[in-house]
Each structure stands twice: as structure tokens, then as C-alpha cells.
Amino acid sequence: MISVEHLTKQYGPFTAVDSVSFTAATGRVTGFLGPNGAGKSTTMRMMVGLTRPSAGQVTIAGRDYHELVNPGLEVGVLLDASAQHAGRTGREILAIAAQTMGLPRSSVAATLARVGLTESEAERRVRNYSLGMRQRLGIATALIGDPQVLVLDEPANGLDPAGIRWMRDLLRGFADQGGTVLLSSHLLHEIEVIADDLVVIGQGRIVAQGSKAELLAAAGTLVRTADPAQQDHLARALHEASVVTNPIDGGLRADADPELVGAAAHRAGVVLRELRAADGAGLEEMFLELTAETAREGAAA
């Protein structure tokens, strides 16, 4: 488990990360989301000892990262897939990682196979790798020590659809076998598919956290009338019941649970064609709503 408690980072008068607290639980994938400049990468760098926090602490399985004698055996980290020696081959980079961790050379071939890098690709210089191949090599470096915790910043960047599916299955399997995954990504659909829990950050502060089901359920209810002409009638009925509504895709999105919306429609004599939780609107809509006031562009305005 990863526990982040009141983590803060200041650069002079600027506070990049402001008293951030959350946990990434064992056996679960935690999605770490936020607009550009929100503080995700700074937070993750502090978690693995690359940036010194101004205040707060992070513990991984109850210990500070700096206390780990051989951290690669306990925490696999991928923060920047481009930060690899361009003149070395993929096999050499993994061999150095294995040697540093005290692992047998046989772990190199096994890990290359695990991330789908072929023998010929392993012999290429990294400067000749595509971005997707660099991502696979970075994930291999994170996995080679067989850690129980993964901290990954944008691991799907540069992967094609088949690669994204492979990564999704890999991380899901890792968590299902008792591992802990903290994953940041701008590919919200992939987070929606794989994550069990969500942590949303904006302007250095946590704006929402909880299970994916809980946060998406808070999106309200999607309702459509059998007769489109009755939609305004339903909107008035919901307004009288103190329910806020907004038009969406030929229907209404109501800030109430489906049972309350259905009861209001019944009292108004409105026949419904669709009534369901608005989680089908997806993570993207929830993310945009939660971060509307903290997105970098909005903050600049």
C-alpha cells in the first residue's frame, strides 16, 4: 500500500503541491488524474525520492522510500520513458538494472519476453526505438525486480491500441495478484476501464477521491422521455422537486438518483424511454467538471 500524507512542495512563493493526502490500496489500481500542471508528476517524484518534499510524507508498505535497502525489488517506477541512455541497447539497460538489484542475468530475457520486446528489438540502440518501444522498456525496468508496488506516470504514452490493451491486461493482472498500482494517464478511457479507485488533483490540491463506482455514481441520472415533446414537462416536474437538470444527448442529466427521478416522472405522468445512472457519461465528463476551475487554462484566465 502507498500512503501519502499532507505532501507539500513549494518553489519559493509558488506551491506546486498543497497538502495532498491519499492512499493507493493493495490489490487495486489507483488512477491519478489531473490537468497539465496540476501537480501529478511532482507528487509522484516526491513519492520515489526524486524531489524533496517541503512537508508531509509518503510511506510504501509502511516505510519511506529512502529506507528501502534495494528499492527496485519493492517499487517499480516509470516516470519518463525517454530518460534512457540512447546509446545503449534495450538488453544492456535491463542488464544494468538487474546487476544493480543483484538479480541473475536470466531475469533480463524473461522480462523482455514479459513486455513483448523481441530478441532483435532488444539488440537495438534505444535511440532507434519508437516511443512505444521505449515505454515497453521502461515498464520492463519497473518490473524486472518483481516488486509489489508500481508507480507509473503516463505508461500508455506512445503505445498503439494493441499495446494499450496489453498494458491494461498486465496491470490488471498485477493488481489481481496482490500488487499495488498507482497510474497517471491523460487517456481517461483507459483509466476508466482499468482503475478501481480514482484520485483527482487540480492546482496542487486533491479535488476528489474514492472508488471509481462512487465517483461516477455522483454524476447523477440520465433520463429520456418516450415522447421528446414531454421532455420540457419532465424538466419542470423535476425543477418543482428541487432537482437541477441539464440537457444532454436528447435527454436530461439530473442531479439526483434514478429512484427520485423516476418517481417525479411518474407523478407528472411522463412515460420514460431511458432511466439510468449517468455513469455512462463516463470519466471524461466527471473529470472536466471536477477540474473546470483548476485546469491550467482556466486558472490563467
Image (tube, rainbow, N blue to C red):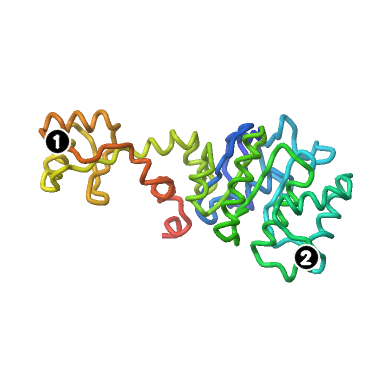
Which residue is under mark 1? 237
Quadrant of the image containing the N terminus: top right
* Front residue (pair 45, 118): 118
Label 2 crowding class (10 Å Cα cut-off): few <14, some 14-19, many 20+?
A: few
Q: Is residue 107 above or below residue 270?
A: below
User: What's the CA distance linking mark 1 and mark 2?
Assistant: 67 Å
Residue located 22% across and 50% down the image: 250
Q: Locate residue 174, reporting x and y percent.
A: 66, 39
**Residue sitting at x 62%, y 35%:** 176
Left or right of 128? Residue 218 is left
Tell me the SS state at disc 1: helix
The picture quadrant where one finds residue 297 is bottom left
Q: Is residue 78 above or below residue 148?
A: below
Q: Position of residue 113 (x, y in %)?
A: 74, 52
Q: Is residue 298 left or right of residue 50?
A: left
Q: Nearer the viewer, residue 27 or 208?
A: 27
Looking at the picture, tell me which residue is in the foreground, 1 or 53: 1
Residue 120 image label: 2
Q: Is residue 50 left or right of residue 155?
A: right
Residue 236 on image: x %, y %: 13, 39
* Left or right of 26 on screen, residue 192: left
| Quarter of the picture holding the C terminus | bottom left
User: Which residue is at a point 66% across and 45% down the rendered structure image?
Assistant: 151
Labelled disc at residue 279: none
- In front: label 1 or label 2: 2
Contact flag, marks 1 and 2 (Cβ < 8 Å): no
Q: Earlier in the sequence, mark 1 or mark 2?
A: 2
> What amino acid is at disc 2?
Ser
Which residue type does callout 1 highlight? Ala
